[in-house]
Image (cartoon, rainbow, N blue to C red):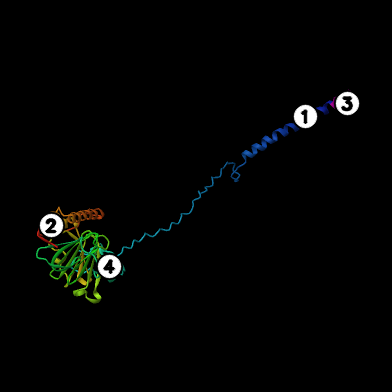
């Protein structure tokens, strides 16, 4: 009995040792596995040396360059040069035909002309106007006559014709044509050496009209034009010369243009210098007692002021010819 007890006790000890050994083995194996895993070569060569893989270089993403198409430069096409005639003794060049420009506007005196039809010229026949407010003054050595209260026949010399209401129209006749001055207009008409000169001092609109019907303007070449205030029409029975366009009379002129094949020309003149230098106007200024004279002089002064105000360069560009004569006071009145 005692022997059996001892045998059972020994068996129990063996069982306990087996269980303890089993538990010890289970606790040691994970550590060894972990140690084996650490000692295992990572390079795969089995030499026990730990190797690390180099980092893989990934280049940054770069967008392809943007294609830029250059814009062609803007081409500025310059037209033909605008030529301004400085020599008024030659006809205006036909620039439109040379450069294929149908209408080329040049800053010349032609802008002072108003083209008109022949039937737009006033008629003198059957006029009942008594000419009470038609004033005619003439320079010395002027040959003229008044065929009617409203009509003047000018042979040689210069006259100043003024028309105020209630009078309507006055006429001046020469061998080259007729001049009509309507109410509230003043004009100077000169006829010397085959040259007719008409200067509109203050007639607005179509107050001063010229009908060229003699000499080179006969028949189909008859012309009717209106003159703007501050402009002068020069017409000749011959081709005009330089001194015809720019006489030495003390009046400043600019922007001369030759028209009608060289037989006529247009000037812009200074009303201020005319009032200072023209014999006929100076004579009116000296007669301060006459009602007509005061009214005429007042209208001239107002027009000079208006033209200066409208001018972009008042007083500039007007040229007086040297050695011009001074205004005299000799005149005749009818």
Residue at the image point whose x is 67% and y is 36% from the top: 32
- In the depicted view, which residue is nearer to us: 170 or 228? 170
Q: Contact (CB < 8 A) between labels 3 and 4?
A: no
> Residue 4, labelled with which disc?
3
Mark nearest the camera among 3 and 1 is: 1
- Quadrant location, the N terminus: top right
Q: Considering only order in the chain, which callout, 4 or 3, is on the residue closer to the N terminus? A: 3
Give SS at disc 1.
Answer: helix
State yes or no: residue 3 in magenta: yes
Label 1 crowding class (10 Å Cα cut-off): few <14, some 14-19, many 20+? Answer: few
Badges 2 and 3: C-beta atoms under 8 Å apart? no
Question: Which quadrant would residue 210 be assigned to in this image?
Answer: bottom left
Q: Count neighbours of disc 3 (C-alpha within 10 A) and say few if under 14, some if 14 to 19, many if 20 or more.
A: few
Q: The magenta stretch spans which residues?
A: 1-8
Instruction: Work out how far the residue at label 3 is from the one at label 1, CA to CA, in angstroms.
Output: 20 Å
What's the CA distance linking mark 2 and mark 1? 162 Å
Q: What is the CA distance from the residue labelled 3 to the residue labelled 4?
A: 162 Å
Vertical order, 52 against 243 (above or below):
above
SS class of the residue under badge 3? helix
Residue under pointer 1: 17
Q: Is residue 168 left or right of residue 24?
A: left
Residue placed most toward the observer, 114 or 330? 330
Mark 4 and mark 2: Cα distance apart in space? 33 Å
* Residue to which mark 4 is pinned: 115
> Along the line of sight, which residue is nearer the eye, 316 or 327?
327
Q: Residue at x 79, y 28 (%)?
A: 16
Please name the residue that numbered disc 2 is placed on.
283
Q: Position of residue 255 (x, y in %)?
A: 21, 62
């Amino acid at each position: 009995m005692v022997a059996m007890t001892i045998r059972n006790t020994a068996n129990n000890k063996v069982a306990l040792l087996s269980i303890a050994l089993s538990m010890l083995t289970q606790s040691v194996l994970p550590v060894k596995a972990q140690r084996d895993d650490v000692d295992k070569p990572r390079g795969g060569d089995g030499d026990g040396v730990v190797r690390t893989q180099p980092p893989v270089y990934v280049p940054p993403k770069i967008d392809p360059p943007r294609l830029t198409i250059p814009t062609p430069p803007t081409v500025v096409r310059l037209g033909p040069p605008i030529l301004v005639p400085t020599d008024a003794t030659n006809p205006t060049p036909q620039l439109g035909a040379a450069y294929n420009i149908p209408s080329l506007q040049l800053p010349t005196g032609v802008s002072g002309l108003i083209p008109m039809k022949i039937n737009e010229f006033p008629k003198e026949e059957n006029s009942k106007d008594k000419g009470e407010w038609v004033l005619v003054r003439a320079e010395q050595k002027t040959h003229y006559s008044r065929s009617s209260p409203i009509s003047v026949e000018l042979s040689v010399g210069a006259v100043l014709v003024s028309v105020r209401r209630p009078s309507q129209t006055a006429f001046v006749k020469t061998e080259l044509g007729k001049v009509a001055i309507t109410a509230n207009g003043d004009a100077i008409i000169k006829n010397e050496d085959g040259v007719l000169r008409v200067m509109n001092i203050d007639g607005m609109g179509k107050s001063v009209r010229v009908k060229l019907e003699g000499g080179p303007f006969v028949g189909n070449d008859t012309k009717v034009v209106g003159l703007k205030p501050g402009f002068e029409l020069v017409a000749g029975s011959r081709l005009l010369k330089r001194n015809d366009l720019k006489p030495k009379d003390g009046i400043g002129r600019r922007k001369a243009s030759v028209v009608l094949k060289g037989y006529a020309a247009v000037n812009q003149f200074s009303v201020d210098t005319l009032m200072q230098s023209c014999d006929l106007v100076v004579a009116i200024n000296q007669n301060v007692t006459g009602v007509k004279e005061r009214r005429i002089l007042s209208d001239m002064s107002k027009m000079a002021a208006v033209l200066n105000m409208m001018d972009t360069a008042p007083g500039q560009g007007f040229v007086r010819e040297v050695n011009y004569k001074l205004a005299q006071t000799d005149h005749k009145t009818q």
